Amino acid sequence: EDGYRLWLRYESIQKQEILDSYLSNIGTVDIAQKDLNPTLRVAADELQKGLSGLLGSGERSNKSRLLIGTASQNPKIAKILEKQNTNFDQKDEYLVFADSKSKQTTIVITGSSDQAVLYGVFAFLRHLQTHQPIEGLSLRSAPRVENRILNHWDNLTRTIERSMSGASLWNWFDLPYYIEPYYIDYARACASVGINGTVLTNVNANSTVLHPQFIEKVAALADTFRPYGIRVYLTARFSAPIELGGLDSADPLDPVVIKWWNDKVAEIYEYVPDFGGFLVKANSEGQPGPQKYGRDHADGANMLADALAPHGGIVMWRAFVYDFEIKEDRHKQAYTEFTNLDGRFRENAIVQTKNGAIDFMPREPYHPLFGATPETTQALELQITQEYLGGDVHLAYLAPMWREVLNADTFAQGKGSTVAKVIDGSVFSHKNTTFAGVSNAGNERNWTGHPIAASNWYAFGRLAWDHTLSSEQIADEWIRMTFNNQSEVVDTIANIMLASHQTVVDYSMPLGLHHIMAEGHHYGPGPWFDQGRPDWTSVYYHRADEAGIGFDRTESGTNALGQYFPERVAKWSDPEQIDERYLLWFHHVSWDFEMDSGETLWNELCLTYQRGVNDVAKWIQEWDGLSGKIDAQRHARVAAMLIRQHADAIFWKDACLSYFQTFSKRPYPKSITPPENDLEHYKNFKLYHVPGHPAEQW
Ligand code: BDP
């Protein structure tokens, strides 16, 4: 059991009474052969695969039947839906239900499109994998967001930026001739949670991917993914007209440049008729962009949007922008630039915004840009890869973190204007709604390195489909499908997973601390780091001194807080009232500041680091208790990684506390295990064992 099958394991059901009930209600699969296009064919194949795995060789009722297909392609389904007066008015909406009469059950898996039928098949199989009753079966769901897209930060050399799960999945050298069988399993995994797009290449883009030799390779991947409803996207390097086209400019208003992109896009569509479009990182961290020519982000985005529009493509223009000229607070730059451009973007130009304003920190307050651009569609970009959350080594289930952002109220149109509702278009009524996640999949046998990290891929897809799902429900489903349905297994793993994000925050960057990681790699601590451009250091962000710690972003500081809506500002500008999880993000407070618990800030900081460490120690015990209850192979791998996570957590705590104590000059509270070494030891530590990582010594 090496984890390759992810949550699509379809292991035979051992519980007799559940198996019996399924066997008597799930009959022969009836799929009309007429118009059986590739999507319906993979839906039928998946169903067969799932049922033969789950039900094994058990005899299925010959009285019951299972109908699958759309109304237009399967007349029997059309008849049933007509009788029930069922219509579909939403894209990719599926409907799965059972109609039982004495000993005979008819199960129908249908929907508004072929794609919806495939989603319905996966929903039905999930129902069985999680041992839900078949009586009264009725599943109906439609995606709340149109584009649900994985962003792969994969280089053409097959390294993956900020990931540790092996090499890139895309075997460019052998494409287009050789289709790795795992491409299909990737597509199945994506489709099973409703993901319908994939950006194949890194945001730090290489224009070579736009060369016809590469487009041919991209087309082979697109052909492979198409039956699963997954469209392919690419990152567009803004200077490609120069590098690839031999032009002397990439000015987005230059007719020659415009023509180059129009031709390039038309060429791509010849190879990939349903090409999704481009994702662009421009004028950020050294990437080329329109500002070089005195143009702005809207000029750049619109040029590409216009090239893509006739073919039905979109451009996702990233709001993660900051340049080399340091402004007073990097936190403010995206908001300033993009609110000024609101109303200028084409309908198919979407601004893609990270969940927070700095950069995927272990915990960030939601980005002030959400809700601040009523005329612009904004996509949410999450990071599935755990760049700042212990790489693929630490156990961190991220649904609770994403829920925090989705639930956050922006107050854009009064109370209840949550980030989720801004993204799904219900606050400002936008088209092309988009939910993006930086993928954590690589060519490791189990795809994601840490076996539990696959839950984040799963959770991303489920939330992109339906952002109202709870972290608990998603964890519960994933555990049952990935491991098994024994309640002790489900409860133990769920408890660990649901606590894990908070735990990682506790031992790394608690109480609103951020960007205090080591130089170059983002794995371990480096709160002392103070070299180079200020906003790449740690001291710029924690601002610890003898008086206290934290970044004053209120009116008395940079006033980045002022970029939020007034209701939010009112609450967060007062250190006594702000949610303490964001305290040091917005306030510089004294070491003796009194926390809700009654402890001083210094003591609370120490106790929080210690709690993080203690939590991981507890998990080690709890995970031990699962021995023999889940398969040995994955059990052993997680157990080993927890030991490393514990050691890393201690390292974080000891490094940070011994450093911060040089400012606080206060003793550790009694219940703290004091750091094992002196500060120099932590400062001198270097991590050398991650070859091939762009940061070299990750
Ligand atoms: C940062 C990563 C960097 C990415 C950048 C981005 O450290 O590798 O290129 O984000 O999102 O988190 O563009």
Image (tube, rainbow, N blue to C red):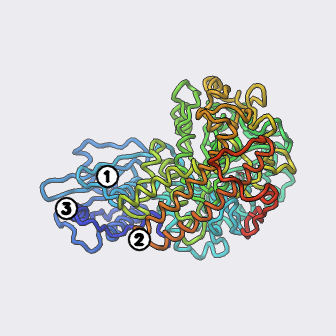
Image coords of residue 697 (percent x, y): 77, 65
Which label's residue is closer to the chain start, 1 or 2? 1
Q: Which residue is label 3 attached to?
A: 64
Between the C-alphas of marks 3 and 1, the distance is 15 Å
Label 1: state its secondary structure: strand
Label 2: state its secondary structure: loop
Dot 1, how many residues are within 10 Å of its Cα: few (below 14), some (14-19), or many (20+)? many
Q: Quadrant of the C terminus?
A: bottom right
Disc 1 residue type (three-letter): Val
Asked whether mark 1 and ligand 1 are closer than 8 Å, the reply comes as no
Q: Which mark is residue 628?
A: 2
Q: Nearer the viewer, mark 1 or mark 2?
A: 2
Relative to 56, say whether 412 is above or below.
above
Disc 3 residue type (three-letter): Ser
Name the residue: 76% across, 45% down. Answer: 660
Q: Which mark is residue 96?
A: 1
Name the residue: 82% across, 61% down. Answer: 684
Asked whether, in this view, residue 578 is left or right of residue 478, the answer is right
Q: Nearer the viewer, mark 2 or mark 3?
A: 2
Say which quarter of the image contains residue 75. bottom left
